[in-house]
Image: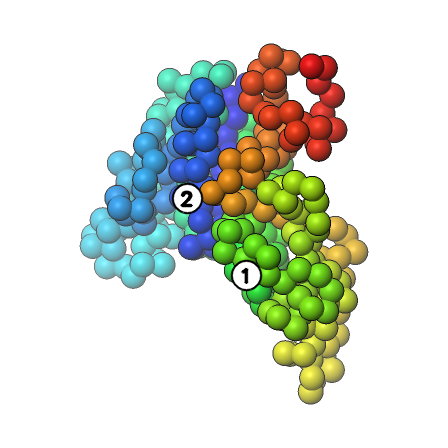
Amino acid sequence: MKVCQLVIGPAGSGKSTFCETMKNHCDAAGRVVHVVNLDPAAEDETITYPVSIDIRELISLEDAMEECGLGPNGGLLFCLEYLEENVEWLMEALEPYSEDDYLLVDCPGQIEAYSHLSVFRTVVGKLQSDGWTVGCVYCLDAQFSEEASKFVAGSLNALTAMVNMELPHVNVMTKMDLVRGRGRGGMEGVERNGSGVDWREEDDEERELIIPDRENLLRALNQTYGKHLKRFARLNEGIVSLLDEWSLIGYVGLDVRDEHSVAGVLMQLDFAVGWMGDEDDVRGKYDQDALEEADYELDV
């Protein structure tokens, strides 16, 4: 089973760090994972993982800006449209990979790439037609949870990507080490950071699920935007209802310093695309505590 996970999310949300962490974790576990860079704006000093395929061999942001006289945003969109026109370049680069290969694709951080352009739908269609099972990982900086407006904006961006990409999807709240222990519970969380975001208490804190608390989130939004204008209050109610009543958005927390947290997130990614392997593979790839929490039946 050939698996490809597209790693997307806002700029600075930790996508490259996510890919590096997963790559290092899998290398240590004896599991083969390859990383593909599809961000034409990436700089050498920011790529700290071995790159198997690099879009900059096809086109780079610097070249697009210089040759076409474009700015950074326009240049990036030009690069992505150029990739779409030359998607066969990517497919040829993937020809050496076999049924046992697992790819992490580090993607650009501009939301336009997933909400307005068709490039990634084209790429996904080509991958699927070539036998790849494709999933999507949306990364969001955990510090977005410290303000209600940022959390809502990040969640709506995640929802936009989920709707447009139409793929098995895992939302990951990155940089949990920066917010751990803050904003827990009820009104206390709102008073400290105004987020209304609660961290569900679990025995295994490394695999916390971040969920919005409806009342706290709505109260925090209204305190900022709905005090004087009733139409903002109605808008806030509609947005919170969308996130809460339909249960469309939830996040798995990732602390890159904790191996159990990394293993838990990797397991969620594998479950999303149905990549498990046989029982011996499962026994070696996931720790027993994580499997028991996921209710995965494995006799040991």
Q: Amino acid at mark 1?
A: Phe
Pick the residue in front: 79 or 230.
230
User: Which of pointers 1 and 2 lies earlier in the amino acid sequence?
Assistant: 2
Q: Please identify the quarter of the rendering in which residue 49 is found.
A: top left
Residue 134 relative to residue 49: left or right: right
Q: Report helix, strand or loop for mark 1.
A: helix
Residue behind mark 2: 17
CA distance separating discs 1 and 2: 17 Å
Q: Residues within 10 Å of mark 2 (few under 14, many from 20)?
A: some
Q: Report helix, strand or loop for mark 2.
A: helix
Q: Residue at x 35, y 58 (%)?
A: 74
Q: Position of residue 80 (x, y in %)?
A: 38, 46
Residue 129 relative to residue 42: left or right: right
Q: Position of residue 248 (x, y in %)?
A: 70, 50
Q: Residue furthest left?
A: 66
- Disc on res. 92: none
Q: Amino acid at mark 2?
A: Thr
Residue 300, relative to residue 256: is it above or below?
above
